[in-house]
Amino acid sequence: MIGKVLGYDKQTNEGTISANDGTRYKFSKENWKDGSTPSSNMEVDFEIADDNIAKDIYVTKNITKDNNTMIGLVAVGLTFFFGFIGTFVSRLFLAKQSIGSSIIATVIHLVITLLVFIPVLGWIIYIVGTGYYMYKNYKLIVE
């Protein structure tokens, strides 16, 4: 059966697919046979298990990949120009992480930013730390 992923929650590893006839089916990560991570608007081919759960799910058309790349680049820009505030916005609003996870990463990035007041060593730590958060924020959105 052909359908489209309506949504997928990375924390619970569960999602919902809408079949072409409008019927909705739940699925879990174990039933996802494609190498990619499920995300909204992916067109998929799947089978239906006896308990009305989607299984053997394969992506037929991934229309979100280009979109995710653009949003990932926006996250990199936000992190580069706004530092720890960009990390918070990228994780909370773009990667749709929980506020707790977003705040933890933001506080760590803030501490790294405060190290810029230590000459030379602090600058190096700041540059490496900000580069790390730019990379991580990008990966959170693209994957």
Image (cartoon, helix red, strand yellow):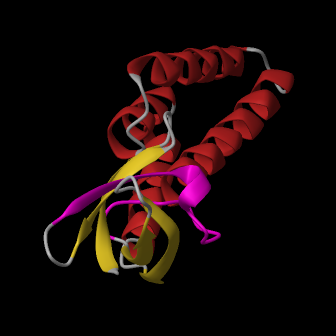
Q: Nearer the viewer, residue 89 or 53?
A: 53
Q: Is residue 59 left or right of residue 51?
A: right
Q: Whole-percent x and y of residue 92?
A: 38, 32
Quarter holding residue 24: bottom left
Q: Mark yes or no: residue 143 visible.
A: no
Residue 86 vs 113, above or below: the answer is below
Determine if the magenta segment contains residue 24. Answer: yes
In the displayed image of the protein, which residue is found farthest to the left? 22
Q: Left or right: 119 with respect to 98?
A: right
Picture residue at 47% right of the left edge, 68% below the top = 69
3 to 49, vertically: above or below: below
Q: Position of residue 136 (x, y in %)?
A: 63, 45
- Residue 112: percent from the left, percent from the top? 68, 21
Any part of residue 26 in sight: yes
Magenta residues (range): 23-41
Q: Is residue 30 magenta?
A: yes
Residue farthest right in this picture = 121
In the rendered image, the quadrant that contains the N terminus is: bottom left
- Picture quarter containing residue 67? bottom left
The quadrant of the rendering that contains the C terminus is: bottom right
Give residue 63's position: percent from left, percent from top.
36, 79
Residue at x-position 45% and y-position 52%: 77
Q: Nearer the viewer, residue 59 or 64?
A: 59
